Image: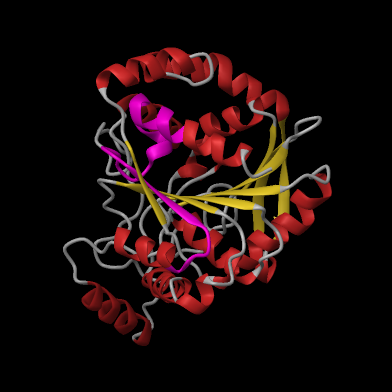
Amino acid sequence: MNEDNLALTASSYSNFKDKYLEIYISQDNYKEEMINIVEPYLKKNLKNGYILGSNSLNLYYEKFIVKNPKANIVICHGFGEFTEKYNELIYYFIKEGYSVFILEHRGHGRSQRLGMDNYQINVEKFDYYIEDFKKFIDEVVIPDNRNKKLLLFAHSMGGCIGTVFLEKYSNYFSAAVLSSPMHGINTGKTPKILASIISKGMKLCGKGSSYLPGQKPYTEKKTLYSRSTSCKERYQYLLEKINKNDNYHSGGSSALWYIESLKATKKLIKRNNVSKIMVPILLFQAEYDTHVIPKAQNKFAAYAKDCKVVHMKGSKHEAYFERDEIAFSFLNRLLSFYDNNI
């Protein structure tokens, strides 16, 4: 495991921002540029559709094909997310010459829902996420990959899905970026052992599909505060999209989702599983992450054959969606990593 800290001083940030402002969208005029520049560009390049996942579930996907791509990037999104959350990132990938593919996981976005209501995140088995992802790659990505390498970008819960995928199927990707991967779930003030007892007790009582205590259905958010980013401009843009689209209204998790996710995280950080990953990994770790546990990420990285850990100073959970001084550093390091592995 190699470690690195990524932070910018005020002066270096000023120089960095001037240098990359032609490439990246600044928070200073974020909403206007996203609506007037990014969204029309993505719409022009968008193709979408559905595949049948495990148990014949309808799963929505999008792809953005470059005529002669350097490589292909497959995005594996996080808990409660959807394709438009990645508009900015997809835009950068395309502009850099990559074709991009993204699947909305079961129970998310426009994919078929599984919860006790239209808001709950539920899953029967965590392995279904992995098998859905494999089917998406086999049926949608590979037929349109122009015989170029596949690169993985996986965030949070998607980082857990992506990691298990890499351990189970070692011959698909050439390199992987894990952004705040869910290698361990942060249960907050509730001790992990208590959360486990409660969720398993609920399942035994036939309430595994009920909301885990503390988890709730979707309610329209009006606050500018986010546990995941300190960039108000990026968060406000996302918030407006969520509130306007019923498909993006995701609430909390079921007890069963927590049980299945806990089993997955325990397995993926075991040495014998981590050792199966054959590709270089760049793992971004946020300083102020309240969603996932850095200790589990460090354990994974220590067992990995080739894993570079980058500590994102000052960042909350979503470094790619943070204030400019954090997001620009993240993006620069991310794109350099991909360029060096194609």
Q: Quadrant of residue 329?
A: top left
Q: Position of residue 244 (x, y in %)?
A: 45, 32
Q: Nearer the viewer, residue 44 or 337?
A: 337
| Whole-percent x, y for residue 106 in the image | 57, 59
Q: Could you tell me if residue 243 is visible in this image?
A: no
Does the magenta portion include 224? no
Is residue 200 placed above or below 226 in the rendered structure?
below
For image coordinates 49% across by 31% down, the residue present is 332
Magenta-span inclusion, residue 325: yes
Q: Is 87 situated above or below 77?
A: above
Q: Quadrant of the N terminus?
A: bottom left
Q: Nearer the viewer, residue 296 or 102?
A: 296
How many marks the image carries: the answer is 0
Q: Which residues are magenta?
A: 303-331
Instruction: Classify residue 177 as left or right of residue 300.
Output: right
* Outermost residue toward the front in this view: 2
Left-right relation of 84 to 146: left
Q: Quadrant of the C terminus?
A: top right
